Image (spheres, rainbow, N blue to C red):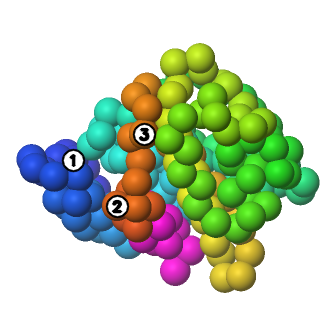
């Protein structure tokens, strides 16, 4: 499949609606998880021009860097550490409007100002997290949470 991503004009919700349909089409056509993670990061990143968009996968007691778009990032994050490790431990999406106010935030890039981390479930187990960083404060809200949680559900259906 070789198609160009279409980015909707309009609100964040409208962008996510069209993005979701395109991600669903791509992930329906492919059953390799890494390939799907790679395309999901590319499609989210291109739609919103975030600073960094990527997956960390649970491997043993750590999160290990997976497919991503954006600058160089930390390779490994321990359980419960940083925003990513907290999302894994708490088993819930973390929305951080100002990373400097988040105790234990791991600064992979000094330009990152706000962040959202969404757990990825395979059945009843968290197997990865989706981490997105923005150069602006307070970029992420409930709309991002709802849509990103829907998007990562497409990985292990
Ligand atoms: N800030 C994250 C680390 C990963 S990077 O942002 C890509 C954290 O605190 O878990």
Q: What stretch is highlighted in magenta?
A: 148-157
Q: Residue 143 carries which label?
A: 2
Q: What element carries label 1?
A: loop
Q: Is residue 66 left or right of residue 85?
A: left
Q: Residues under labels 2 and 3: Cα distance?
A: 13 Å
Crowding at dot 2, Cα within 10 Å, few <14 / some 14-19 / many 20+, comes out as: few
Say if residue 51 shows up in the picture.
no
Q: Residues under labels 3 and 1: Cα distance?
A: 26 Å
Crowding at dot 1, Cα within 10 Å, few <14 / some 14-19 / many 20+, comes out as: some
Kindly indicate the quadrant of the structure image that contains residue 138.
top left
Disc 2 or disc 3, which is closer to the eye? 3
147 up-or-down from 67: above or below? below
Lower position in the chain sequence, tag 1 or tag 2: 1
The location of residue 24, given as percent across then percent down, is 33, 68
Q: Which residue lies furthest to the top in this view?
A: 110
The residue tagged 1 is 5
The residue tagged 3 is 138
Kindly indicate the quadrant of the structure image that contains residue 93.
bottom right
Lower position in the chain sequence, tag 2 or tag 3: 3
| Number of numbered discs on residues | 3
Q: Which residue is drawn at 65% across and 75% down?
A: 122
């Amino acid at each position: 499949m070789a198609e160009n991503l279409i980015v909707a004009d309009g609100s964040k919700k409208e962008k996510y609606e069209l993005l979701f349909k395109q991600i669903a089409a791509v992930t329906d056509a492919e059953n390799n998880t890494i390939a799907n993670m790679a395309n999901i990061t590319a499609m989210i990143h291109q739609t919103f021009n975030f600073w960094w968009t990527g997956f960390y996968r649970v491997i043993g007691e750590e999160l290990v860097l997976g497919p991503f778009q954006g600058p160089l990032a930390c390779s490994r994050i321990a359980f419960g550490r940083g925003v990513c490790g907290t999302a894994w431990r708490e088993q819930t999406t973390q929305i951080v409007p100002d990373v400097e106010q988040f105790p234990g935030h791991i600064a992979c890039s000094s330009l990152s100002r706000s962040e959202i981390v969404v757990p990825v479930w395979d059945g009843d187990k968290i197997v990865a997290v989706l981490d997105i960083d923005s150069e602006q404060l307070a970029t992420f809200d409930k709309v991002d949470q709802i849509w990103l949680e829907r998007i990562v559900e497409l990985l292990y259906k």
